[in-house]
Amino acid sequence: MTHTNNDRPGLRALVAVRLSVRTDESTSPKRQREAGEAEARRLGAEVVGYAEDLDVSATRTTPFERPELGDWLARPDDFDVIVWWRLDRAVRSMGDMAELTRWAKRHGKRLVFAEGPGGSSLELDMTSIMSELITMLLAFAAQMESQAIKERVTSANAALRAMGRYSGGLPPYGYAPVQRPAGEGWTLAQDPKRVEAIETMIRMLLDGNAPNAIAFHLNSKDILTPRDWNDVRQGRNPKGRKWVGQTVKRVLLSPSLLGHQTYAGSVVRDGNGLPVSITSDPILTRDRFEQIKAALGERPKGAAGNRKDTGALLLGVLHCASCKGRMYRVPAHGYSVYVCRARTKGLHCEASVAIKTDWVEEYAEREFLKEWGGFPVLERVTYPGYDPRPELEEITTELRELYAVRESRRSRVGLAIWQEQVDALEGRAEVLEATPVQKERTELVPTGKTYADYWRIGDARERRFMLLDTGTRLECAKGQRGGRPADMKRRALERLSIDLQGTRVQRQGHTAA
């Protein structure tokens, strides 16, 4: 919002500027300002301020709802006349025009447009019934133009979607618009930072975190939501929207992660029933997408899912010799210990035990590396198969929806379009029904490193995985009371037994590219 000094009495003009899309040069703010200033000079008025509302749609906001113009309209004593470049910069509906003219009549304000019908200036005189009629007719014309523009844009966007081209608007999270080769419109490519956020969500989900816990983590790391990121991408200030569980689920369940074009939440399909691709570089494979769907679908209601990794090296490795339950690391007086927690779980343990963390972790490391340190680490490489059933289920759902609305098609054209959609989906269903399920294939390959190599560079969590992956198990028995303090560590270690006869294959493999 801009103010200018007004040191002399006279007609005071407010120049109003509005732009739906900031990059539209044909109606640029500069052009609108210059037209408004020229019209103010013709009226003999002094410009006392500018109301500039950029990236603001006239079909979605009334003049009173726009950030800058709305603020000026709330202070009618600060100006005498409002000047717009053209009427469509002010309103695009009869209802908004009626509301604006009532306001002008009530406050005795003049509404002026630098370019009216025929290109000459237009001033709306609120004291004349004929002027009010002309005003509403002009508003009706603006509303019809707005509807025509909307229909043309909708039709053009539908054509672009069918061709697998980006049609504008909010891009699917994880992608950014890029120009196609030879300037043939736009497509989508992976956005590395957004893909990194998606990978974080997937990792947390598969580790047992609920969507709400994932949202909390994203907010704590100041990761922008899809709409805030789009604001930044378009040069606007983000509104500080927060991640919520539903947003996380919507991102992770979007078919766009598979590279599929979507509209109104459904996959767009071509004439053969195949999903239209929006990118040549999808973020997820079908198998991984189905894994995410299963993780979100199988979560029990009310599950917290926000448990954090404690960083305890021997969690799941160290057990109580009496009840065979896990031992957990807890703080003690200036140090920490692993303890049997059977009683806190309502279970009975004949000989509950505890042992100092440093002693047992040093022992576990020494014994593990003595046994396993020189062995090569094998990695499980999984080559994904192909299962046509998930896509077949999607097509089945779409066909059911189409069959349900057949009777609502009254024209021959409508029935023909309906039949085209059904034929395409049934054709794709035939192909999928004839496609056998290909099971994934797994191979064990050397990594070129030993367990000792990985142990040196790993953190507590990674080392714990090595212990668990090799089947290492420790048990701690209850000791005898008494004895010299100097012998406490030796006696504690004597209570330990370790089983190192597990598999030599790492459980955690990776999927081959």
Image: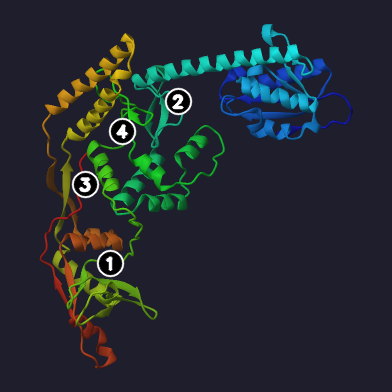
Say which of marks 4 and 3 sits in front: 4
**Which is nearer the eye, 446 or 208?**
208
Question: Marks 2/3: CA distance?
Answer: 36 Å
Question: Marks 3/1: CA distance?
Answer: 23 Å
Quadrant for the N terminus in the image: top right
The image quadrant of residue 402 is top left
**Which is nearer the eye, 262 or 140?**
140
Mark 2 burial class by Cα count in 10 Å: few <14, some 14-19, many 20+: few
Q: Give the x, y percent position of residue 206.
A: 28, 50
* Residue for badge 1: 313
Mark 3 burial class by Cα count in 10 Å: few <14, some 14-19, many 20+: few
The image quadrant of residue 476 is bottom left
Question: Marks 1/4: CA distance?
Answer: 37 Å
Question: Marks 1/2: CA distance?
Answer: 50 Å
Question: Marks 4/3: CA distance?
Answer: 19 Å
Provide the secondary structure element on which disc 2 rests. loop
Amino acid type at mark 2: Gly
Q: Give the x, y percent position of residue 34.
A: 71, 19
Q: Are marks 4 and 3 in contact (CB under 8 Å)?
A: no
Say which of marks 1 and 2 sits in front: 2
* Residue for badge 3: 510
Residue at x 12% of width, y 45% of height: 443
Q: Earlier in the sequence, mark 3 or mark 1?
A: 1
Quadrant for the C terminus in the image: top left
Amino acid type at mark 4: Pro
